[in-house]
Image (spheres, rainbow, N blue to C red):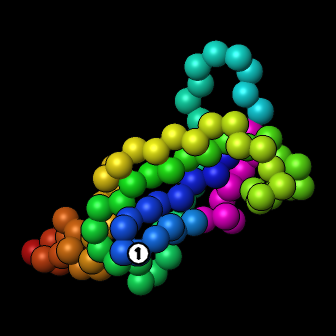
Amino acid sequence: MGASLYRSGVGYIDDGANDAPVSLAPGTHAVTRDFRVPPGTPAGSYGLWVSLYLDENGSISVADFPIVLQTVSATVTIQDPGSGIFADDFEDGP
């Protein structure tokens, strides 16, 4: 299972290190995988691209057969460092 983030003007952000093989039985299943956003990724809203491939060589590449590509627009928001809920140092206590 592969995943990428996409934003116009930035392009695709991939995390190939966390692409993972999955075996799925027929039916509906919840499946998860980690995704690391690289430092320096510009803040903003990103679409999520998730893909399933019939793997031919041990990693997602042009040699593989795409089975499903699901995209969800503007579903992930990357914030600037320090702009999170603890930006006022609330986590340090009074």
* 43 vs 31, nearest the viewer: 43
Q: Report x, y in % for residue 91.
A: 22, 71
Label 1: element kind: loop
Tell whether 81 sits left or right of 70: left
- 70 lies above or below 77: above
The residue indicated by pointer 1 is: 10
- 57 lies above or below 12: above
| Residue in view at x 23 percent, y 69 percent | 84
Mark 1: few, some, or many residues within 10 Å (few <14, many ≥20)? few
Q: Is residue 18 magenta?
A: yes
Name the main secondary structure of what is drawn in magenta: loop
Label 1 sits on what residue type?
Val
Outermost residue on the left side: it is 94
Q: How many marks?
A: 1
Q: Is residue 92 visible?
A: no
* 39 vs 14, nearest the viewer: 14
Q: Is residue 67 visible?
A: yes
| Residue in view at x 55 percent, y 46 percent | 50
- Residue range (magenta): 15-22
| Residue in view at x 55 percent, y 30 percent | 30
* 5 vs 38, nearest the viewer: 5
Q: Looking at the rendering, which quadrant does residue 14 occupy?
A: bottom right
